[in-house]
Image (tube, rainbow, N blue to C red):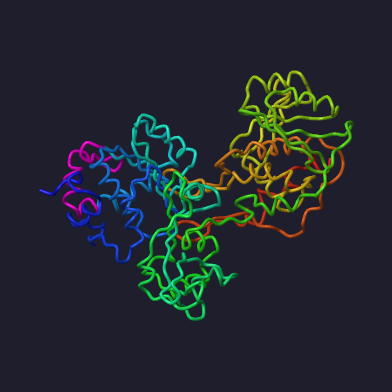
């Protein structure tokens, strides 16, 4: 009879004492994975690992969850992106590891299925996030979010409620990152940010390994010598150096224990192999950054980058005359956020706690039109619309519409309401900022807070819950996005209520829309969509006679 996990002092004693093996039947060892040793034993309440692909974290999580569930009596919910991922992961990895280890097999004898396993007196549940089901309605002591950045982030957030009645309240996240300040990278930024430090035997300089072809002082690989080198003395680092590294936290007072695991620290990856992968024609920048370096990657197509927004700044304040037509976009919530602009661009953004300030703006600008969020403050927004009939419109942001109709204005009994395609309208505004088509009157200091709301929006893949096939893309938020949405409402109003003129002449260069790397490292895209032809026409073609630049 195998000894129980609670009979071992720690997980390493259990791994050695029970001769625990992986799914292939190989013993768990740390000669090729020295950087995992401390992570196995980390009992932090909040644990996050921003990683490259295929570095052993899934095996670690399976074994760590099993040991901790038995020893500490933890109920665990383990999430993956889709139900298909759950079936593949549990059937192809979890079950094989259990079958190769007698002590684990005895633990799950009473209840063992794809979706749940009983480990002694504890339960472990496996669920997808891109699923037709809601978040599982059971309590848990630990949430584990595997491949968080490919998961549905709002469902991930819903699972936090499952910890409310637990005395442990643990959350583990690990994933290769996707976009900056999104998913696991957001967790990493809030953590103590541990880096794997190595010591150069030539000059005794301690350093973490990094990649930067533009700055030799930050480059740990010599491309000509095809070797790892010290960033200080540039001497070649012997192979054993990477194995003898140690984790060093950047911050000491952060509540999250965070690890960055790039392939640079993996002893089995030589400098030559990494250089060859970097230079391979099939290696895209996104793949290199996210799957090899374990760092987030973004271009202007998946996020409104800071430089893409700030290039629109005029550097000085400006405001229209009181009798000029303006449009106010308003997003409601705990507070009211708004933006103001006309055909000459955006000139003001702000927030307020009640509608008195907005009433004042409507009085000051006698021709002002307001488009306000219909789904936030249900009572206040409608009372505001009733006070300004014909000048305030309630806007409903919906999902992808089946037609090319971006915006539909209500008629007859529905007058005063407007429906807009959320994702496509956000994309339009992002593209216009990228193409310098919306002047923003003011300085970086005056508009930095506004841009932060845009920075919390990212374009993510939408996966079919059954097939894991990419169905489309959706703009998701990982923080407050109220002024970004207020700008979308402003943009809806600008389609209809503006005078003659043009903001900025659009660029003649055709810019492709974004695409992402599929799990098999290929790219799937529709050429019509990619080059803005066919059914997804350009902004000018879509808006026809009510184009806000050509009314």
In the foreground, 442 or 514: 442
In the rendered image, the residue lying farthest to the bottom is 225
In the foreground, 325 or 535: 325
In the foreground, 88 or 343: 343
Left or right of residue 167: residue 109? left
In the rendered image, the residue lying farthest to the front is 204
Locate residue 416, reporting x and y percent. 73, 24
Q: Residue at x 65, y 43 (%)?
A: 426
Locate residue 390, reporting x and y percent. 79, 23
Q: Residue at x 56, y 52 (%)?
A: 180
- Residue 485 vs 353, above or below: the answer is below
Left or right of residue 364: residue 479? left
Locate residue 252, reporting x and y percent. 46, 50
Q: Residue at x 66, y 52 (%)?
A: 306
Left or right of residue 247: residue 328? right
Does the segment drawn in magenta span residue 15? Answer: no
> Which quarter of the picture shows residue 18?
bottom left
- Residue 398 vs 8, above or below: the answer is above
Locate residue 376, reporting x and y percent. 61, 27
Q: Which residues are magenta?
A: 97-122
> Which quarter of the picture shows residue 329?
top right
Q: Quadrant of the C terminus?
A: top right
Q: Residue at x 72, y 36 (%)?
A: 492
């Amino acid at each position: 009879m195998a000894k129980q996990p609670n009979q071992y002092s720690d997980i390493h004693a259990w791994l050695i004492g029970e001769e625990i093996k992986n799914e292939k039947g190989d013993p768990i060892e740390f000669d090729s994975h020295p950087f995992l040793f401390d992570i196995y034993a980390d009992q932090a309440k909040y644990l996050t690992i921003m990683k490259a692909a295929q570095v052993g974290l899934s095996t670690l999580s399976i074994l760590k969850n099993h040991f901790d569930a038995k020893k500490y009596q933890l109920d665990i919910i383990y999430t993956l992106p889709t139900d298909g991922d759950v079936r593949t992961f549990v059937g192809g990895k979890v079950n094989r590891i259990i079958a190769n280890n007698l002590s684990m097999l005895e633990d799950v004898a009473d209840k063992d299925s794809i979706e749940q396993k009983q480990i002694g007196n504890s339960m472990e549940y496996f669920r997808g996030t891109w699923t037709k089901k809601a978040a599982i309605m059971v309590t848990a002591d630990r949430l584990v979010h595997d491949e968080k950045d490919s998961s549905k982030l709002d469902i991930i957030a819903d699972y936090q409620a499952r910890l409310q009645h637990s005395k442990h309240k643990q959350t583990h996240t690990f994933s290769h990152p996707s976009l900056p300040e999104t998913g696991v990278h957001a967790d990493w930024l809030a953590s103590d940010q541990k880096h794997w430090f190595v010591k150069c035997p030539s000059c005794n300089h301690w350093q973490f390994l990094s990649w930067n072809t533009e700055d030799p002082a930050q480059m740990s690989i010599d491309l000509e010598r095809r070797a790892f080198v010290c960033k200080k003395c540039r001497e070649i680092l012997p192979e054993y150096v990477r194995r003898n590294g140690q984790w060093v936290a950047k911050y000491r007072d952060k509540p999250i224990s965070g690890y960055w695991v790039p392939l640079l620290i993996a002893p089995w990856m030589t400098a030559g192999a990494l250089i060859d992968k970097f230079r391979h024609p099939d290696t895209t920048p996104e793949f290199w950054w996210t799957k090899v370096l374990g760092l987030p990657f973004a271009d202007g197509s998946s996020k409104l980058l800071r430089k893409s927004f700030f290039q629109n700044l005029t550097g000085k304040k400006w405001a229209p005359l009181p009798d000029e037509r303006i449009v106010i976009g308003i997003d409601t919530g705990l507070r009211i956020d708004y933006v103001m602009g006309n055909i000459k661009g955006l000139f003001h953004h702000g927030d307020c706690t009640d509608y008195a300030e907005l009433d004042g703006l409507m009085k000051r600008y006698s021709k002002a039109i307001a488009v306000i969020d219909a789904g936030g403050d249900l009572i206040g927004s409608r009372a505001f619309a009733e006070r300004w009939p014909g000048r305030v419109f309630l806007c409903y942001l919906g999902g992808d519409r089946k037609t090319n109709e971006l915006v539909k204005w209500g008629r007859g009994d529905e007058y005063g309401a407007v429906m807009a395609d959320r994702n496509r309208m956000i994309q339009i505004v992002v593209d216009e900022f990228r193409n310098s088509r919306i002047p923003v009157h003011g300085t970086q200091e005056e508009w930095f807070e506004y841009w932060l709301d845009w920075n919390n929006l990212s374009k993510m893949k939408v996966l079919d819950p059954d097939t894991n096939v990419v169905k489309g893309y959706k703009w998701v938020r990982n923080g407050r996005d109220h002024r970004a949405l207020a700008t979308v409402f402003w943009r809806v109003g600008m389609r209809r209520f503006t005078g003659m003129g043009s903001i900025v002449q659009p660029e003649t260069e055709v810019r492709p829309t974004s695409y992402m790397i599929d799990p098999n490292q290929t790219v799937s895209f529709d050429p019509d969509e990619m080059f803005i032809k066919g059914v997804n026409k350009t902004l000018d073609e879509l808006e026809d006679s009510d184009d806000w630049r050509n009314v």
